Amino acid sequence: MADTALVVLVSAIVLAGAGALALIAIALRRRRKRRQARGNPDPAGDYAQRVNWAPTSGKLNFSSFVYMDVDGDGTYGEADRPMAGVMVRLYDERGTFLAAVRSNAAGFANFPMSSRRRSAAIQRPGVYRFSVSVPPGWRASSANADQSVRLLEAPGSMVGLAGERLPKPVGLAPVRTVSGGTPAGTGATLSVMGKGRLLESRALPADAAFRLPLGVDADEIAIAGSGLDRRLSLSAYPVDLGLLAPGALAPDAALKAIGFDDVTPRGLCKVPSGYAGLDWRNLNAMSRDHTANSEGYVNGNVSGTYIAYTSSGHPAEFGRAAPFGFHSVMLTAAWLNSEGEVALVESWLGDDLIASDEIALSALAPVHYAPMLKAVTRVRISTRHHWQAVLDDLVVAL
């Protein structure tokens, strides 16, 4: 019993000593922070030139930049946009995996570099490989998804290392398709055009779903037959026409694109009824970078800097009493964690449901949903699992 009591006493003393040391360390840190906050009263060194060029204890990002190659030319240009949520992996010259990072809202996958910090992904000179994980159904239009860069000792630099160059921008482009469905008892032909020239023509089966690839040169599609006639200028994204119905909007209809950029100068605002001549329910307009780490808000923004999204993932609607044409809209999943979410888009004319389509969404790029309905009074957008859907470039005929 005496030995046990002695052990307990010694343990208590040790714990008390450790606690006291911890309190002293905390007090010293607080004192140092207060001193740093006050600053140095001597102005002589306010703008002094650096004399000791030894590496600091800080870290510097060595970055791989990924962009949506909107024009598909493999070069980062004014038409292109940074992509968020793309995975980039880092390997050393022996092929050892070091780190995996997703690109941020500005398109940069950042790998911390420091010769003095063990937590840095890059700590020493050598050849490093940056490998962009190309999403399924996409292509690396810049043909440089894997790049190797040599890093050298740089004693006078901030972190003691410097690259011979930075990785070149990596362009990604979705492999475009056109999909939809045909009613029973119809026959139609889908033609694919490029710069006014017929590239290919295919018969569409009756009462069936279709999904066809689109070449990189395609810029327009046309459907003819059984009253399903319509034309659509193609964007950089996959197209879903929904279930084709007779009486589509005429090719020369006066169209209005709603991009949500003039709803508010603030970062976020509920879309008010009357905006753009329509009534709105449960849709918010938001700046693309207002919410951190949301890939779809960034990648779903195809024009300007604002998008709209279904508030809290609840069903949203737009419409008005007088019929108007619903041509198309860009639809994106808000979050990469909801990849494959399905949007249900229902369109009414008065009390009659005239169209109902399910659209598979991605957070990496929009789907160009183009029902081209001649007359609707209400459109309702909901998601199967109640994640937010992103809207941009809603095109209507008022």
Image (cartoon, grey):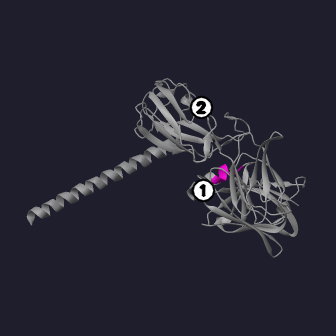
Please name the residue that numbered disc 2 is placed on.
168
Of 44 and 121, the residue lying toward us? 121
Amino acid type at circle 2 is Lys
Question: What residue is drawn where x is 58% and y is 59%?
Answer: 338
The foreground one among 247 and 114 is 247
Relative to 54, residue 206 above or below: below
Q: Residue at x 60, y 52 (%)?
A: 292
Image quarter in which the C terminus is found = bottom right
Sequence-first disc among 2 and 1 = 2
Residue bounds of the magenta highlight: 296-301
Say few, some or many: other residues with alpha carbon within 10 Å of mark 2 (under 14 / 14 to 19 / 20 or more).
some
Residue 105 is one of the magenta-drawn residues: no
Q: Which residue is mark 1?
A: 335
The image position of residue 195, as x and y in percent, is 81, 39
Question: Which picture quadrant has residue 325?
Answer: bottom right
User: Mark 1, residues whose alpha carbon is within 10 Å: few (<14), some, or many (≥20)?
Assistant: many
At label 1, the amino acid type is Trp
